[in-house]
């Protein structure tokens, strides 16, 4: 039986769960100066929201169960991989400058709250009574619509790309024969500078599309229909943070290291786009967001990148 908690779309309910969980993670990480749980806490939060909203929502329709499982599988894979990686490397270098600063470190965890909650919205809204409880104005078209199929295909392709690319990079960096600081350019990385980003974007576009079918049969209320369409903020937010906030534009240091060590950047820069290659330039630079900010200009940016890389290498033990 569906349970209505705070609001019929589960928005307040899930933001409270996410905030409490992430702030608990922050308290542990800051108190013990321990950043090994950071990505684990973020990824596992998706698992918690998927499971809790499915169980509390109480509408175990095929679409709800399948979509919840897909998100939980994605969450287990990414949080498990990142946790394993940080255990192997010993620490997360992203936090070296902020770990001891209370408010700067807290800001990261607040950003993680927003990331988890916003990106999980399509599933949260699908599992809510307002959308899936037929007795209270919800809708449940038979599973297998064109939206369901399209969403499943997109998610599967994205999950495959993200998983394989992460493993390829980890094995490449772990190999004793790999030259120090040489960026990967094999496997999926020969086609893209960030194949995991491309895969993750596909996963969340797939989840949003998969959650849309209840809007199609005309029985859903206008507010619930608007909420489902409005959940497009999830894949859009994912695209924005990956393209503009998670390293998409931060190629200067990597470029400097590459030029400094082997002078390989020019050929790699020409060969690989941010997410894809072997497409017409006009398509890359418009529809597929391969903006100038993602391109390394050796003449313009090379000297500064080399100097930054040299300083970092000089300070390494």
Image (tube, grey):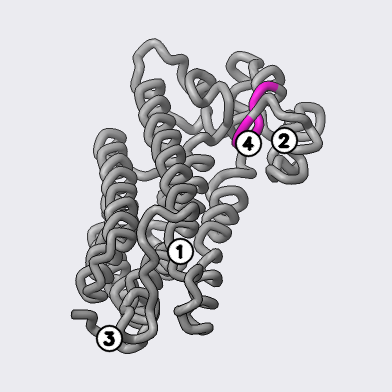
Residue that sits furthest to the top in the current view? 177
**Disc 4 or disc 1, which is closer to the eye?**
1
Q: CA distance from mark 1 to mark 2?
A: 39 Å
Of label 4 and label 1, which has the lower sequence position?
Answer: 1
Give the image quarter of residue 169: top left
SS at circle 1: helix
User: Picture coordinates of residue 226 (x, y %)?
Assistant: 54, 77
Residue 107 is at least partly visible in this image: no
In the foreground, 165 or 280? 280
Give the image quarter of residue 59: bottom left
**Disc 3 or disc 4, which is closer to the eye?**
3
Provide the residue span drawn in magenta. Answer: 271-276
Q: Residues within 10 Å of mark 1 (few under 14, many from 20)?
A: many
Q: Which residue is mark 4?
A: 274
Of label 2 and label 4, which has the lower sequence position?
Answer: 4
User: Picture coordinates of residue 286 (x, y %)?
Assistant: 77, 45
Residue 295 numbered mark, or none: 2
Q: Residue at x 48, y 40 (%)?
A: 199
Give the image quarter of residue 282: top right
Residue 97 numbered mark, or none: none
Q: CA distance from mark 2 to mark 3?
A: 49 Å
**Is residue 208 found left or right of 295 in the rendered image?**
left
**Is residue 210 found left or right of 88 in the rendered image?**
right
Q: CA distance from mark 3 to mark 4?
A: 43 Å
């Amino acid at each position: 039986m569906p349970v209505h908690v705070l609001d019929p779309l589960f928005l307040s309910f899930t933001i409270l769960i996410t905030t409490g969980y992430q702030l608990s993670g922050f308290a542990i990480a800051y108190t013990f100066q321990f950043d090994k749980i950071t990505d684990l806490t973020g990824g596992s939060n998706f698992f918690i929201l998927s499971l809790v909203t499915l169980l509390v929502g109480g509408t175990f329709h095929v679409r709800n169960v399948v979509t919840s499982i897909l998100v939980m599988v994605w969450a287990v894979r990414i949080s498990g991989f990142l946790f394993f990686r940080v255990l192997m490397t010993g620490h997360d270098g992203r936090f070296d400058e902020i770990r001891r600063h209370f408010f700067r470190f807290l800001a990261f965890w607040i950003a993680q709250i927003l990331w988890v909650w916003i990106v999980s919205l399509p599933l949260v809204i699908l599992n809510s009574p307002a959308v899936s409880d037929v007795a209270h104005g919800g809708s449940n078209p038979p599973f297998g619509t064109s939206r369901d199929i399209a969403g499943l295909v997109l998610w599967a392709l994205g999950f495959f790309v993200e998983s394989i690319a992460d493993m390829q990079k980890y094995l490449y960096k772990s190999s004793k024969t790999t030259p120090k600081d040489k960026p990967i350019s094999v496997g999926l990385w020969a086609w893209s500078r960030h194949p995991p980003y491309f895969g993750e974007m596909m996963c969340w576009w797939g989840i949003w599309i998969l959650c849309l079918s209840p809007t199609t049969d005309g029985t859903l209320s206008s507010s619930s229909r608007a909420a489902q369409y409005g959940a497009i903020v999830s894949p859009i937010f994912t695209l924005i943070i990956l393209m503009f906030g998670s390293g998409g534009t931060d190629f200067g240091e990597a470029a400097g290291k590459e030029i400094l060590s082997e002078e390989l950047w020019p050929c790699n820069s020409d060969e690989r786009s941010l997410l894809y290659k072997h497409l017409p330039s006009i398509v890359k630079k418009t529809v597929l967001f391969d903006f100038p900010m993602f391109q390394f200009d050796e003449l313009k940016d090379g000297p500064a990148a080399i100097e930054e890389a040299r300083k970092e290498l000089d300070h390494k033990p």
